[in-house]
Image (cartoon, grey):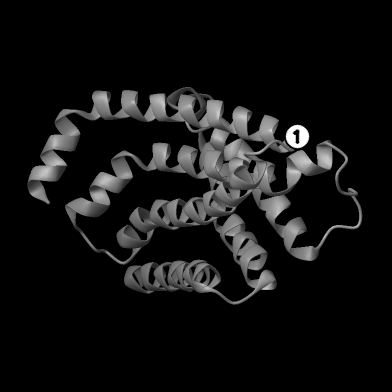
Amino acid sequence: MDKVFAFSVARKATIIFVWKIVYLLFVIFLFLGSRSIYLVDDASLWFYKTGVWAGRAALVFFVITSLPGMARRFDIRHKFFSLLMIFRRYLGITTYLLALMHASFVRLVSLLAGFEPWFPRPLFEMFGTVALALLFPLFLTSNDRSVARLGVWWQRMHNLFYLIMWLIFAHAAIQRVSIWSVLIGMTGIAEIMSFVWARRSKV
């Protein structure tokens, strides 16, 4: 792990550049998939299924993004968590783009195309929509300029992360109990325990 940490820190700028290339590819893929679903061409079903898995990947990235904060509150010191903390912002951006891909391919494009009625919508979709909407300002402010301009409000805004976690849990759990709903639910419980632990440690 020490070698991985040293390698990643030494090549941080290169890794971030590669990550930005990946973001560009995500945006292109999002456009192509949305177009395919809108036109209902031969690849539309494949893009739909990809959108389902994009949602699962977004959930995993969301959980990974939560780990450095939990480790800090539990006073767990390991270079793995330090490495995640260094690239946490980019993990968060990846989470949003995957979640947007999920929402677009699975439902949003179909709604915009008029294939489905806007109302009424299932409860789990409403929770997912609110979670995605709250992730958007976090996505927009995941940069040094926003941190400098917003000051203390930046941290307050990004505390929405913990509300979003439970919205994602509701989105997954209302559909069915699965490994994904269990994963995000256990992560939420671990978050609560970490705050309790940190508070008791200060007493």
Q: Nearer the viewer, residue 4 or 33?
A: 33
Residue at x 54%, y 25% (from the top left corner):
28
Q: Say which quarter of the image contains residue 123.
A: bottom right
In x, y percent, where is residue 2?
Answer: 9, 48
Neighbour class for label 1 at 10 Å: few (<14), some, many (≥20)? some
In x, y percent, where is residue 202?
Answer: 34, 68
Q: Say which quarter of the image contains residue 75.
A: bottom left
Residue at x 30%, y 47% (from the top left corner):
84
User: Can see residue 135?
Assistant: no
Q: Is residue 81 above or below residue 87?
A: below
Q: Quadrant of the C terminus?
A: bottom left
Q: Is residue 9 rendered to the left or right of residue 169?
A: left
Q: Nearer the viewer, residue 22 or 168?
A: 22
Element on which disc 1 rests: helix
Residue at x 85%, y 58% (from the top left corner):
121
How many marks on residues?
A: 1
In x, y percent, where is residue 4?
Answer: 13, 44
Q: Read off the residue under disc 1.
A: 38
Q: Is residue 3 above or below residue 33?
A: below
Q: Is residue 90 rendered to the left or right of residue 37?
A: left
Q: Is residue 79 above or below residue 40?
A: below
Q: Label 1 amino acid?
A: Tyr
Q: Nearer the viewer, residue 27 or 124?
A: 27
User: Can see residue 108?
Assistant: yes
Residue at x 68%, y 70% (from the top left corner):
175
The single residue placed furthest to the bottom in the displayed view is 177
Q: Nearer the viewer, residue 157 or 121?
A: 121
